[in-house]
Amino acid sequence: MIEVREKIGVPKYKQIIASVEHYISNGILKKGDKLPSINTIKNSNNLSRDTVLMAFNELKNRGIIQSVVGKGYYVASDNIKIEQKVFLLFDELNSFKEDLYSSFLHHLGDNIQVDIFFHHFNKNIFQKLINDNIGDYNYYVIMPANFTNTNEIIQFLPKDKVYILDQIHDDLENYNSVYQNFENTILENLNKISNSIKKYDKIILVFQEKKQPLGLLKGFKSFCKNKSIQHEIISEINDENIEKGILYIILDDKSLLKVIKKMKTQNLILSKDIGVISYNDTLLKEIVEGGITTISTDFNQMGKKLAEMILNKESAKIENPNKLIIRNSI
């Protein structure tokens, strides 16, 4: 079925790829059909095993064929227009990640397939998803959350094909990345509004260590220490009343809504009785209670830059920009 010719100016592995694509596009090979074995193609065309394997690996990375252990290679998709496949591993899906994802897809274009997975801050799931997909994709985009020793899990992926997203840890310093510098971001932006913060008796940071970047916690503590500000760190907004004279720094939207609800129940006035700073801007935060002050990165820019790096095969570590948006809440 697969014939490779000499001296036609086309690499032999590409001739194998073109043959498989030709037979699929003409309906001779259909989804689920078995391909000739590597040895059959090798022997019938006097090729090296590596040449055939190179062709099969590229087809596999594009999702056109798949290997079944002990049985061989089969047609997995008839969409031969897919040029590359990207493995995208998020921690969770929220409105910010949706913006990032949409921007990433838009700037990649139509001929690159992106398969999205979620580890939900579970390291076992994270490891299984990585291990189950080694060799199946052209690029791997990974959001490592707060996991330690991540490099031990991803070390078997091709290093030049891996992009770290959002958080970068010490063991991942040598990987390509588009990241947020959480420690500097919160420290610098709180310093910008330190005069407004001083009118409050205490700052409370609502912080979940399992889910939220440790750099934020470190930057928050540095700010409070440098400014000698009384502060407290809690993991959630509980059923007790919120206190007057407190500035709440809230990283998740559920806690933000709890504080606003309690504020209304207690007839407290935002920016007079209590203050609120939220992380990551949304349309809701522009509107609710006259506007919530936010510290936010640009997720659309993050998705765009990540796509450009992949399309241009760019190797770099890029810090994503952030901004402080001051509104009514402080």
Image (cartoon, grey):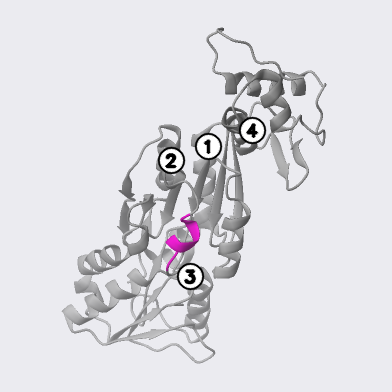
Gap in Å between the C-alphas at discs 3 and 1?
A: 26 Å
- Name the spot of residue 13 as percent of width and height, x first: 59, 23
Label 2 close to label 1 by CB (< 8 Å)? yes
Kindly identify the residue that appears in the image at 72 percent across and 18 percent down.
Answer: 22
Disc 2, SS:
helix
The question of residue 154 being in magenta is answered with yes
Judge by depth and name the residue closer to the eye, 24 or 2.
Answer: 2
Front of the two marks 3 and 4:
4
Answer above or below: position of 201 versus 249.
Answer: below
Label 3 close to label 1 by CB (< 8 Å)? no
Residue hosting label 2:
304
The magenta region covers 149-155
Kindly identify the residue that appears in the image at 46 percent across and 65 percent down.
Answer: 145
Disc on the earlier residue, 1 or 4: 4
- Name the spot of residue 10 as percent of width and height, x first: 55, 13
Q: Residues within 10 Å of mark 2 (few under 14, many from 20)?
A: some
For the image shown, how many numbered marks are present on the structure? 4
Front of the two marks 3 and 1:
1
Residue hosting label 1:
106
State the mark number for residue 252: 3
Front of the two marks 2 and 4:
4
Identify the amino acid type marked 4: Phe
The question of residue 286 being in magenta is answered with no
Disc 4, SS:
helix
Answer above or below: position of 297 versus 103.
Answer: below
